[in-house]
Amino acid sequence: MPTPRLSITLIQRPFPRIVLTSLWFGLLSLPLMMELKAPFFGLERPLLVSAGVAMAGLMRLAVSQRGGPGAERVQRMVGSIGGAVRHLTEQIDRRVIYVVAVASAVVIPLSLNRYHIDILTQVGIYVTLALGLNIVVGLAGLLDLGYVAFYAVGAYTYGLLSTRVGLSFWEVLPLGALLAAIFGILLGIPVLRLRGDYLAIVTLGFGEMIRITLNNWDSVTRGPNGILGIARPRLLGFTFSSPIDYYYLILVIVLLTIFVVDRLNQSRIGRAWTAMRDDEVAAEAMGINLMKAKLLAFGLGATWAGLAGVFFAAKMTFISPESFTFFESVIILCMVVLGGMGSVLGVILGASMLVILPEMMRQFALYRMLIFGGAMVVMMVLRPQGLIASSRRGIALGPKDRQGSASAAVTSPQKMG
Amino acid sequence: MLVQQLINGLTLGSVYALIALGYTMVYGIIELINFAHGEIYMLGAYMGIITFGLLTTLHLTFPTSGAALLIMMVMAMLFCGACGITIERLAYRPLRGASRLAPLISALGVSIFLQNFVMLAQGPRDKGFPHLFAGEGIDLFGSRISAIQMFIMATSVLMMAALQLLVHRTKIGKAMRATAQDMQMASLVGIDVDRVISATFLIGSALAGVAGIMVGMYYGLINFFIGYIAGIKAFTAAVLGGIGNIPGAMLGGLLLGLIEALGAGYISSEYKDVFAFAILVLVLIFRPSGLLGKDISRRV
């Protein structure tokens, strides 16, 4: 019975402190709410203030209760959802789940309208991107804030090669992925020695440099006007044109991504990455070649962004630097963080949520980034491991042990790097 | 031309230095890159406009615009300092001792939150900053230093001198230096580490608030997005000088301003922002400890 306990702890808190913190946030947000024209105070402003104060007060409450019974309760509630999902997937034969999931992904869109199929295609693009970033951030623990640059590399590779050279989609698809991987490694080489926080800034700078270059290099990229009239993919005389065609195309890419990332996750390289993420020095002492592991992470992570970029260019038939801003990087990072760093299932869930929820809340579109920002903080403070924590098991366990490990993950969520 | 570029560069550089101080002080103590610091600077600029609006609406007139400016700066410092402390309590303190990635992502979240909060509250369009300086400026070697430029440089120097005094001559400054050297040891000898960290955020944020007002006056326009690029540049300045090192941040800021002004003047103004990133990458590759970063015992 989580709900009664939670409400009790809310009441038990010293009342004046909640009021004081709320007042404090009101005081902080009030000046920013002031309208500069006469009449000095607009009427809709107080509404915004009170909403902000209430939210801030609740956030403060949640934060101050971290480790307290209330927070633990919330944590456990979120955790048990993730745990239940994982528990369920462990009970049933994995192959059955795969078949059911793939079958429904193939069949269900047939009954949907174009708008919904378009959204599902978006989900596909972002799942590919987020799984790629998950290799870098979630598995290898390297915070990359310029991931969108590789997406741009893929998109512009197809855009340029299609309009100028006339190469087809299928020729460019591996080329774009390869070029993105090369860019990833090129970025990786200079930053090999950097620690996490420096790395974040350098990758951010790298992303911005690519975007500024795309914006200003008029003779090649046509600057802010972008590239128009990119060819649609063709296969054996069939041209991809309706949303459902693109949906099936991205579905194939997504399935390939999931398969490869999952295999990588459980491979030697994947283990090397996780070891490196948790403790670089210890990992090196155990014989892991850090340089190789980091470059592989950058390269393999960027590959998927390149693939997604080529697909994006082919679907939109138009690209411009505007699609590749820093915020795109942030949103992809949010998907990884909210879903659960390092967990493939979590990342897919995160990407789906962050594409579908904003579509459902169109009227709150303005508040989307505000909520993203707040959610990132709350998530880090309350549940840093994301909705579905990544599980790490060395060997296959018996059914009884499985149950034990699933519930252990729920009650004592481990810290994620 | 050259002298004019140097003057412009020094003006911009002294602002970068003021913001860089906040990054460097926080990094020196808790080894966190405070992504939200650029946003604090943006809040300072907005607070300046709002205070000015409040003063004119209340029909408070002053014999000189200097008095109004002083009030604006004090308000911005107070407001930004309060915001800095609050952000630390809310988003960073609960994550102390967590993995290194967690506070970074949390800081990024604060940054996005503040940007969008201001965009929603104050609108996405550019806002004009009041003209408070009518001064002519003076001619120097055929170039002109405007009154605003003189004011910016003088204020920055004053602020930095005050900060140096605070760090080296006061009790809280001593506590800050001790905490930067060894947080655990500092708490063992009776220093309230939480208070020291709060003070660091307060001071750094107040300096960023002043920088916000100065840039607002210099360019005449502000918007909710100015904190992003200024934050990255100030961070570059801090790294250039050696992060964690206060004189380093000042030197790095001035150098970065000069390089950028010269680059924009002689190479290409379109790629102005690329220079800052290129410098950052080069410094990190060839001298990760920065120009003055060797002297570890002096970092605060």
Image (tube, rainbow, N blue to C red):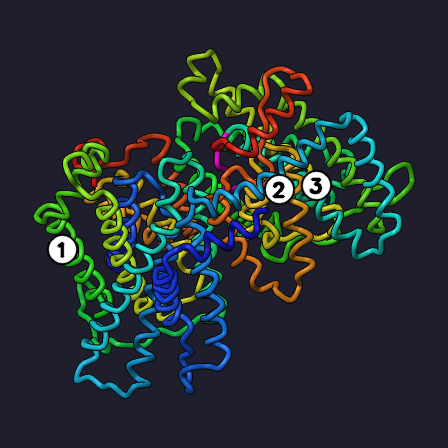
Rendered residue at 83%/55% (across/down): A114
Q: Which residue is mark 3?
A: A310
Q: Quadrant of residue B280?
A: top left
Q: Is residue A107 visible?
A: yes
Q: Which chain is disc 1 placed on?
A: B
Q: Is residue A372 left or right of residue B279?
A: right
Disc 1 residue type (three-letter): Ala
State the residue lying farthest toward the right.
A237
State the residue lying farthest toward the top.
A287
Q: Which residue is mark 2?
A: A151
Please state the horizontal and vertical placement of residue B106, each as a whole percent of the image: 44, 46
Q: Look at the numbered disc 2 and give the secondary structure of its residue.
A: helix
Q: Are marks 3 and 2 in contact (CB under 8 Å)?
A: no
Rendered residue at 41%/86% (across/down): A38
Q: Which residue is mark 1?
A: B162
Q: Look at the numbered disc 1 and give the secondary structure of its residue.
A: helix
- Which of pointers 3 and 2 lies earlier in the amino acid sequence? 2
Closer to the camera in the image, A147 or A91? A91
- With respect to residue A147, does B125 lie above or below? below
Please state the horizontal and vertical placement of residue B17, each as a whole percent of the image: 26, 51
Disc 2 residue type (three-letter): Tyr
Disc 3 residue type (three-letter): Val
Disc 3 from disc 2: Cα separation: 8 Å
Q: Is residue A328 left or right of residue B88?
A: right
Q: Are marks 2 and 1 in contact (CB under 8 Å)?
A: no
Q: Mark 3 vs mark 2: same chain?
A: yes
State the residue lying farthest toward the left.
B169
- The question of residue B120 being in magenta is answered with no
Q: Which chain is disc 3 placed on?
A: A
Q: Look at the numbered disc 3 and give the secondary structure of its residue.
A: helix
- Region of the chain picked out in magenta, as a range: A141-153
- The question of residue A144 being in magenta is answered with yes
